[in-house]
Each structure stands twice: as C-alpha cells, then as structure tokens.
Image (cartoon, coloured by chain):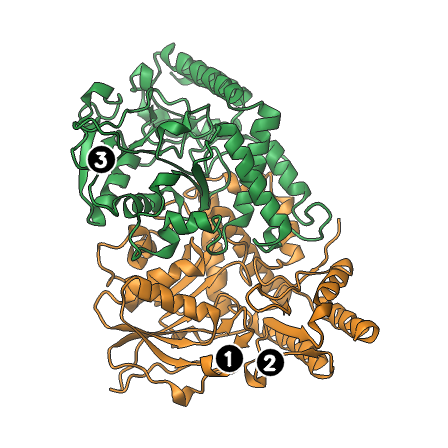
Chain colours: A green, B orange
Amino acid sequence: MTRHYNFCAGPAALPSAVLERARSELLDYQGRGLSVMEMSHRSDEFVAIAERAEADLRDLLAIPSHYRVLFLQGGASMQFSMIPMNLLGQGGSANFIQTGVWGKKALNEAKRLGFACHVAASSEANGHTAVPGEESLTISDDAAYLHYTSNETIGGLEFDYIPQAIRVDGNDVPLVCDMSSNILSGPIDVSEFGVIYAGAQKNIGPAGLTIVLVRDDLLGSAPSTIPSLFDYQLLAEAGSMVNTPPTYAWYLSGLVFQWLKNDVGGLEAMDAMNQRKAQKLYAAIDGSRFYSNPIARQNRSRMNVPFVLADERLDALFLREADEAGLLNLKGHRSVGGMRASLYNAVPEEAVDALIAFMADFEQRRG
Amino acid sequence: MTRHYNFCAGPAALPSAVLERARSELLDYQGRGLSVMEMSHRSDEFVAIAERAEADLRDLLAIPSHYRVLFLQGGASMQFSMIPMNLLGQGGSANFIQTGVWGKKALNEAKRLGFACHVAASSEANGHTAVPGEESLTISDDAAYLHYTSNETIGGLEFDYIPQAIRVDGNDVPLVCDMSSNILSGPIDVSEFGVIYAGAQKNIGPAGLTIVLVRDDLLGSAPSTIPSLFDYQLLAEAGSMVNTPPTYAWYLSGLVFQWLKNDVGGLEAMDAMNQRKAQKLYAAIDGSRFYSNPIARQNRSRMNVPFVLADERLDALFLREADEAGLLNLKGHRSVGGMRASLYNAVPEEAVDALIAFMADFEQRRG
C-alpha cells in the first residue's frame, strides 16, 4: 500500500490515521458484528456516534449553546437555496459580497428562486485578486442577511476579516458564511455569525455531508410551503434525522474531529501548522521567477494556492512529472487553468516540503 | 472480527464481499496512492468508477437507453418534493395509491408544496394489510402522473402487480414508483415507468445516495424557479455532477452492482433467492401459533417481514435473546411495535435459517 501526497481541492485528502481507523472497524464496529454503514440511524450505537461527533465539533469550534448543528445532505450548493428560503420568510433582501465563483453561484441561485438580491461589495473589478475593503460595504436598507464566502476555493482568495453586517439604519443583520473550504482550519468566533455552512469534502470528511450551524433565533421563520427537508426548524427538531442521514459520512467526520482534538491538539495548533504550510509555499513561489500567484498578499488563501508557470506550454509536463513523483492533483480548476495546490488540514507539512523541492527541481531543469 | 446476521430495515446489511473489497482499497485505490473518498469527482479515476456503476446498473435492470440514471443526495424523501416540482410544471394533479406510511409521506409533501393531489386508491380501510385491487383505481381527469410505493418498508406490504396508469379519458399518465425497499430484489420492466426512485440504504449501498431513473420525455418541463439541484434536466445534463456528488456511496453502490452481477449471477438468481428466503420465514410464522403476520398472502413483502408474538410481554426478551444469538435489529418500527425481519439482498439464506431456528427454540422455551 502506498499513500501519495494529495493536493486535491475536493473531495480532498483525509488524515491517514482516520482512514486506518475506519478500515480497522469497517466490517465490525467495536465487536457489534456489523459495519457502521449497516446500522439503523436510530440505533443506540449510531446515535452515540452522531452525538459524539456533534459534541466534538462544538468543542473544537467553541460553538455557543444557542446554535444548532445540522448534519445534512446536498452539499453547500443546496444551502444556496435553503438559506434564502429559511431567512427571507419575513421578506427583505439577501445581500452578498462577491469574491469569486462560489459566491456568484450563491447569488445566482437566490435570484433564480425569485428573491430580492443586492451586491453589497464585489472584487470583480480587480479580477477577484483582493477582497473588498470593509469600508466599501454598502448593505441595503432591506437587507435580511449578508452572505459571503470566507475562502474562494477556485480563486484562492481568503477574507482577512469578518465583515460587520450593519445596515445604513444602524441595525445589525445576520452574517451568513460559506466556509466550505476553510472551516476548521483555525479557530473562529462563531458568535459573530447567524449561519455558517460547509460542504464536508475539504476539511471535514467525505463528500455527501454538509454541516450547517444556525443561531436559534433564525429558526422557525421559513414559510410552511418550502420542502420539509429544507426547513432548518424541522431539521433541528429532528436532530438532522427527518429522514435517514448520510450515516457513514457522519461517522467519518466524527473521526476527523477526534483526530483534530487528540492527534493535532485542537484548532490553534492546526492554525499554526496551516500558516506554516502556506507561508512556505508562497515564499517559494515569490522567491522564483518561474512561478507566480496573482492574489494580494493579505488575501492569499491558506487552503488553496493557485499558481502559474512562466511558460504555460510546460503545464502538462509539470503535472505529469509531479504525478510520477507522488504529488497528486495539482491541476488548476478547469475554469482558470494553471496549477492549484490545496493545503487542507489533512495535507501534512512534508507534502508541502516535497512539493517545494519538486518545484525547485522542475524550475532548474525546465525553467 | 465477527459478522452477525443483520435484519435491519435500513440502513441495512451490505454484502460482506463488498465491504471486504472496500476495506482492501480504502487507503489506496488500485495503487493510485489515495482513497476513492479523496479523489476529485472529475478525475479520470472517479469518472471511470461512476460510469462503470451506471453501466452495471443499466445492465442489471435492462434500463432502456431513453432513461437517464441519476445519482443524487437527499434520500427518497427529497424526491417527494422533486417529483411534483419536475412533473407538475405544466399543471395537473399528482395521483397517489396509498398503502402505508411512505406513500402517505409522499402525498403529504406534495400537498405541503401546494400541488393538487388526488388519492386514486387506498388500503387504509383494511389497515394497509392488502394492496387495493387494480380495478379499484380511480385516476383523476387532470392526473399528470400516478405515484405508488411498490413495497412499504414499515407495514411489510408489497404490490403484486404494476398499476396501469390510465385516466378516464383513456390517456396514459406516467407511473412514478418509490422502489426504495425492493429495487434490485428481482427483475422489473423499467419501460412501464416514467420515474423510478430509491434511497440506496436497503438494496443499493450506504445511506446518502438516491438513485432516480427518469424517462427522457419527462425532463425539461420543470419551472426555472425551482432549486437548480432539484431540476432533473440540469442534473441529467451534468451527469449528476452539478455539484460534488456523494462519491464514496456511489463507488460502494458500484461494488454492490458488481456483486449482483458476478457473485449472485444477476437479478433472476437474486429473485429466486429472495423468494426462497421469504417463503421459508412466512412458512415458519404460519406454521406456528406463537408468531403471526397480518398481511394478505399475495401482498406479503419479500423484503420486510413484520411479525408479532402471541404475548407482547415477551417482546423485549425475544429481542435480547436474538441479539445475544447474533440476530441483530429485529425490533419492529417504533410506530407499529412487534418484530420485523428485513431480508434484503445482502441477507444470506443462512441468516433466515438461523432466525427460523431461533424462533422455534424461543417458542418452545417461552411460548
């Protein structure tokens, strides 16, 4: 068995220790004679797994008790519909900060569903290479919430601040954040948010699970005519088990939470490791005349590092040689080309060191 | 490691051979140095896995080429919303045959969303112990489709015929079937249906995946104001990858399809085995004065066999002793009590033999 270094943007690398644990109990969970996949979601065994996962996540992120934690299906993209359906039940508009592809999708889905939308700020004019300054936010008078994407996975652009969602009339509105690609990369103050959501397949677990944190006061105002599986209140009351949840993904995510707590030592330790990994790679890029990254320094993503070669005719060769060297999935997103190294939690520092060494060697031979 | 006999109604038993295969490549898929869970859904490796799964499913069910196969999230319950949203775009009503809990949920969800609904037949009067005769169907003049649940997992009631969906005016309407708990239990004629859907967690794979077969002519009439992840046309065009699909559940389902083809020998062989398993268990129940099942013989489910003891005060003891004997998850659904043995494809005939022997022994000792 070989484990290569995997820089995939998602579904992304999982900690080897988590996969080894999953393998050891795949056919027989703790002597019960069956797999976690084969258990009723309402069995004592699975309910204990589910509750433990939630408790560990609450512990890691210090989630206040007036927030619900939902374990859902459909990906972050399903939240693009669910959020306006839940939060615009009393009217008003959805406000958005636009910093790239995923924020645009969230905006377009709310528009598609017929909701009033307002762009409070956008980095489109600079090609999404720098996050709009906080002073440039213009939140509409009818804003019911402000949505942003804390890390744009494709562009490699990350917020260096938490926006203050204050309308011209001085009223706060709930802040809603798509944290799919940087949740759990370090500590956050959950109490600054109304809703935080994230597809699992970067820093949480396998694809097919979506985590949503919702502040209690935002439950219960959805119209009774939306799909029942979209209603945060119903989902919260049922402990995310209105119907059968994705049990195995939930279990694996719980193993990742345990890994973060016990093996890594919590989110401050994870944050320090992520800072180090990203700084090393950006330093290598900046120190070269062959590689470059276009993002403003204060907004460079710690999770997704896009870069281009000085000569794009070498892209295919770079990718082939990297793959042969056990450095997998460095191809940039099909919409932008070039390279992208995703440095999620489960990507070890040695992987970054190996990538930097390969890049230097490639530059020397081919640059 | 121990593998007990698992009679869970869902998430249900998976073939041990499938889990062993998954275990062997959990950390390293075919020498690529990463898990299937860690692959981009757009990678060559995963696309090959996904296409192979679809091809094998098409082969097993002889799915005609004018049907799309979708691999979705949300469970069968999400289809309770998606179906009317997709099929009632041109108006008309949803017609339902009601034979138990799941059919009722499908009806209630369509009502909740504000769609016109009509009950074409119901077995409520007989306590859902016999499927309504085909001659009793009254399909409304404005019917856009007829929905039924081919096997009611909780009640243990299975259709012994495929309803003809013909309106009084003589026009056919598409037949829509929730096959969650009996799909792949034997051959079916897909061409009789407009839509077939099934949550994976009984006969397909782990929870978190839903398979939908849709006839081509039913695509493309959804209003453009429904969530984009609900639109069959968009999902079909994107090969079920509008966003990241539940890749690992898709892969495991593919392994189940290969097991059905190669180890079992196809759906006719599976059908014969399922008939044998169910006949044995019903014969044991009928041959006893201690156990009973209320369902009309021609509608007894081959998949879910509910039964009660003559003295319900013995229920807890029966369940405890069964569990100790390695016969797991025989408790009836919380809404009906008693016992339920689910005999899905992955439950081997030896499991049924062991259950019957245990039941006879228990009756002799305690009956």
Q: Residue furthest right?
A: B365
Report which residue position mark 1 lands on.
B127
Q: Position of residue B311 (x, y in %)?
A: 71, 74
**In which quadrant is the C terminus of chain A drawn?**
top left
Q: What is the C-alpha distance between the residues marked 1 and 2?
A: 10 Å
Q: Position of residue B191 (x, y in %)?
A: 39, 75
Q: What is the C-alpha distance between the residues marked 1 and 3?
A: 51 Å
Looking at the picture, tell me which residue is in the foreground, A244 or B220.
Answer: A244
Residue at image location 63% in from the left, 63% down from the top: B346
**In which quadrant is the N terminus of chain A drawn?**
top right
Q: Could you tell whether B136 is left or right of A349 in the image?
A: left
Type of amino acid under label 1: Gly
**Tag 1 secondary structure:** loop
- Asked if badges 1 and 3 are on one and the same chain, I answer no
Q: Are marks 1 and 2 in contact (CB under 8 Å)?
A: yes
Q: What is the C-alpha distance between the residues marked 3 and 2?
A: 57 Å
Check residue A95 in the rendering and tell me which mark sits there, or answer none: 3
